[in-house]
Amino acid sequence: MPTLPKILFVDDEQDLRDIAIEYFGTQYEVLTAENAEAARKTFQLSPPNVAILDVRMPGEDGLSLARWIREQYPQTGIVMLTTAAEVVDRIIGLELGADDYIAKPFDLRELSARVKSVLRRVIDRGDANRQQLQAKPHRTRLGLCELDLKEHRLYGRDGVEIGLTSMEFDLLKVFAEHPNKVMNRDQIMALACHRDWDVYDRSIDLRVMRLRRKIETDPDKPEVLKTVRGAGYMLLQP
């Protein structure tokens, strides 16, 4: 049975979230979140293909969340829910990278049509990225950065090389070759072939901290190279 596309509906109104589940549930795998914090947790566990975001939410608003999604999960499509009068919100949302918007109150059929259109664009983007990776099979994505396993080089989102020591590259290579897998210090050392790293000191922790400064948008709140409390580290890839 084919996997259903995944959409995330983010709105602080419980009734709208329930309606989204009921209306879209036969077409998509529907996830919901009542605020930006819950949405971020959902992304970290199960990134959706399309996110539908209410602009006006208590706490962090949908525009801020859209910026974070576009930075951390560039392949996810974004549809903004705005009020009819808030033209500025629509303009800002599109500038932040939203794919489309629809004004509240909305017709579910129109929202469905917009989601389908954005989903087609997401699939097209994914196909283009796969073709690019096939052309450069020795490169892998690390958040907004790209690691060239052949040339031992790390490139930022602007294509400019980011300096790496040989040990930093070896560590990144281990994570890149084992994405979404929790690894403890012993496993990391064995895979990196650096037995001179002492599992009982903080050498790996310090190197991870340095790498986060290079690949994370906010090193203090890592979204790519995650710490799994009591278990080790994991490179998160959509």
Image (spheres, grey):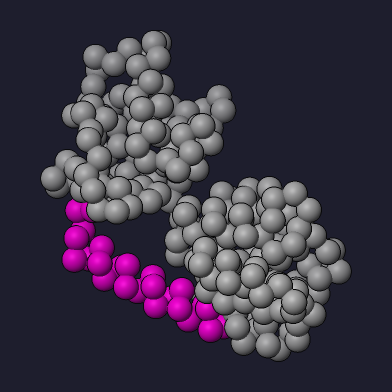
Give 82 or 49, whichever is nearer the viewer. 82
- Per the picture, the main secondary structure of the magenta-coloured stretch is helix
The question of residue 120 being in magenta is answered with yes
Q: How many marks?
A: 0
Residue at left offset 31%, top offset 68%? 130
Q: Is 93 placed above or below 142 here?
A: below
Q: In the rendered image, is residue 1 in sight?
A: no
In the picture, measured across the screen, residue 158 lies left or right of residue 3, that is left
x then y, percent, for residue 25: 71, 75
In the picture, measured across the screen, residue 5 lies left or right of residue 29, that is left
Residue at left offset 69%, top offset 50%? 60
Q: Quadrant of the N terminus?
A: bottom right
x then y, percent, for residue 152: 17, 41
In the picture, measured across the screen, residue 68 lies left or right of residue 57, that is left
Q: Quadrant of residue 209?
A: top left
Q: Is 144 placed above or below 135 here?
A: above
Q: In the rendered image, is residue 184 in sight?
A: yes
x then y, percent, for residue 118: 53, 78
Give 68 or 178, whichever is nearer the viewer. 68
Seen as rendered, the residue at the extreme left is 151
The question of residue 89 being in magenta is answered with no
Magenta stretch in the rendered image = 116-139
Residue at left offset 30%, top offset 44%? 177
Q: Quadrant of residue 26?
A: bottom right
Residue at left offset 34%, top offset 24%? 207
x then y, percent, for residue 201: 39, 10
Seen as rendered, the residue at the extreme right is 15
